[in-house]
């Protein structure tokens, strides 16, 4: 049995809204995990050398492989409006596709520079789709850093795909969110064992496996940052299954239960399928909870996963949340998680980084979850930190990863304790 829901959760508590200087990566970062997931896709960033450097340094692991992303660099003459950037883009795309016949989906990814010169990538995508159909489908979305955070790149990418999905009347379950293949396979196996199907995924691993969507489609999100994709699917007539997100044993069970209910799965079948992995997840989390119990945590706004993680850490690992910051608070998606997060922490949306640094310095939490740019200075001030971006690069969903998720938070605390012991 899971712990009962708190008497008062955080769904309706006042939210501290801040609009000031922010410290986050831009949406281009999502290409790092999206290109691994979509095996016949190419991401062409239309941007500057800064964008190219961000991708190259963030994706350094790709240097031995033929990469499936690149940057069409906007030079000074493009920015000054002296060159026809569309002609150059068409030429670059033609060159790329003739060299890489394996590409089936091409994403033109907008950036700050392409937005500054108002390059219309939506029209470019339409034009290029017509030129290269049916072999290649061309989409566009923005990964620009202006007023965005890094997980919005995936949301914008998936939302861009929805209007092009074919119409279907089939009753199908759509899992939405780019999970590592091994984690996706675990989820599919659990759903299949309960007799739920057919199940499709967005994004699919290959273009040929892309799903249809229609009024009989029901969909479950696996990531809390997919607000635009959610809206796009609802516009296509699909129905969302609201649930806490599948982080930790409790989140996974409630997420699966909501999906199972939508497909009429009996309690007995649900119990038979989930009992063993639930027990494994509990044991794996307990191994880390010993380190985490009684400790406090403070979230800076980065990944939009913060409310779900605070729910997991407070309810399954015995931590106390002091502040739960998130770039955007989509209560329509996060409501079920917020219901389970007991009233107490400050819930903040957006950022004014100096004010938030003042708050973390005065509270001195045991663990601070923040971006790379803040982590080092805070460590130098004696605070223990966890990089938020690791939460999207590490497999953390569903039962078999629940222990690893807890481990991401317990490791920095154990390391700190070890260093203290050695120094003593
Ligand atoms: Fe920088 Fe904007 Fe390019 Fe992102 S899109 S790397 S924020 S210039």
Image (tube, helix red, strand yellow):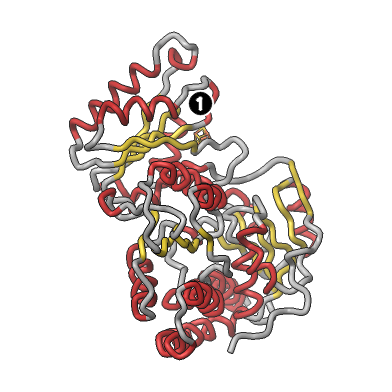
Of the pair 348 and 155, the residue shown nearer to us: 155
In the image: residue 385, left or right of residue 247: right
Percent of width and height locating residue 44: 36, 35
The residue lying furthest to the top in this view is 82
Kindly indicate the quadrant of the structure image that contains residue 388. Answer: bottom right
Quadrant including the C terminus: bottom right
In the image: residue 335, left or right of residue 270: right
Percent of width and height locating residue 51: 45, 34
Percent of width and height locating residue 134: 23, 36
Q: Secondary structure at mark 1?
A: helix
Q: Is residue 407 visible?
A: no
* Residue 276 versus residue 362 in the image, above or below: below
In the image: residue 299, left or right of residue 179: right
Residue topped by disc 1? 113
Percent of width and height locating residue 119: 47, 22
Of the pair 293 and 130, the residue shown nearer to us: 130
Tell me the residue at 52%/81% (across/down).
Answer: 285
* Residue 121 versus residue 362 in the image, above or below: above
* Residue 170 versus residue 293 in the image, above or below: above
Tell me the residue at 40%/63% (across/down).
Answer: 171
Tell me the residue at 38%/68% (across/down).
Answer: 183
Quadrant including the N terminus: bottom right
Mark 1: C-beta under 8 Å from nearest atom of ligand 1? yes
Tell me the residue at 67%/58% (across/down).
Answer: 331
């Amino acid at each position: 049995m899971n712990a009962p829901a708190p008497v008062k959760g955080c769904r309706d508590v006042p939210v501290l809204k801040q609009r000031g200087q922010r410290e986050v990566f831009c949406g281009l970062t999502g290409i790092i995990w999206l290109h691994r997931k979509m095996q016949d896709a190419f991401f062409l960033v239309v941007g500057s050398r800064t964008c190219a450097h961000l991708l190259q340094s963030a994706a350094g692991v790709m240097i031995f492989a033929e990469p499936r992303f690149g940057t069409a660099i906007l030079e000074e003459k493009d920015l000054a409006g002296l060159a026809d950037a569309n002609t150059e883009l068409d030429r670059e795309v033609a060159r790329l596709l003739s060299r890489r016949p394996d590409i089936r989906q091409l994403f033109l990814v907008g950036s700050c520079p392409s937005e500054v010169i108002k390059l219309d990538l939506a029209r470019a995508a339409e034009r290029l789709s017509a030129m290269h159909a049916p072999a290649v489908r061309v989409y566009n979305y923005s990964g620009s850093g202006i007023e965005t955070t890094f997980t919005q790149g995936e949301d914008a990418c998936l939302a861009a795909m929805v209007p092009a999905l074919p119409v279907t009347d089939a009753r199908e379950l759509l899992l939405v969110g780019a999970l590592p293949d091994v984690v996706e396979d675990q989820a599919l196996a659990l759903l299949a064992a309960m007799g739920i199907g057919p199940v499709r995924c967005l994004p699919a691993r290959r273009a040929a496996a892309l799903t249809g969507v229609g009024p009989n489609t029901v969909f479950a999100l696996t990531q809390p940052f997919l607000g635009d994709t959610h809206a796009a699917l609802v516009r296509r007539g699909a129905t969302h299954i609201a649930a806490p997100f599948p982080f930790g044993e409790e989140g996974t069970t409630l997420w699966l239960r909501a999906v199972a209910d939508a497909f009429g799965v009996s309690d007995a079948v649900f119990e038979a399928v989930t009992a063993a992995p639930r027990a494994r997840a509990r044991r794996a989390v307990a191994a880390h909870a010993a380190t985490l119990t009684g400790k406090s945590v403070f979230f800076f706004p980065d990944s939009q996963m913060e409310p779900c993680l605070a729910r997991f850490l407070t309810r399954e690992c015995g931590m106390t949340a002091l502040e739960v910051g998130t770039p955007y608070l989509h209560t329509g998606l996060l409501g079920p998680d917020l219901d389970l997060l007991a009233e107490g922490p400050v819930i903040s949306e957006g950022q004014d980084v100096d004010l938030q640094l003042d708050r973390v310095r005065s509270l001195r939490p045991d663990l601070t979850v923040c971006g790379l740019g803040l982590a080092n200075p805070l460590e130098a001030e004696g605070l223990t930190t966890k990089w938020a971006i690791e939460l999207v690069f590490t497999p953390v969903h569903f039962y078999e990863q629940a222990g690893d998720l807890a481990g991401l938070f317990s490791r920095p605390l154990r390391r700190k304790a070890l260093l203290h012991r050695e120094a003593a």
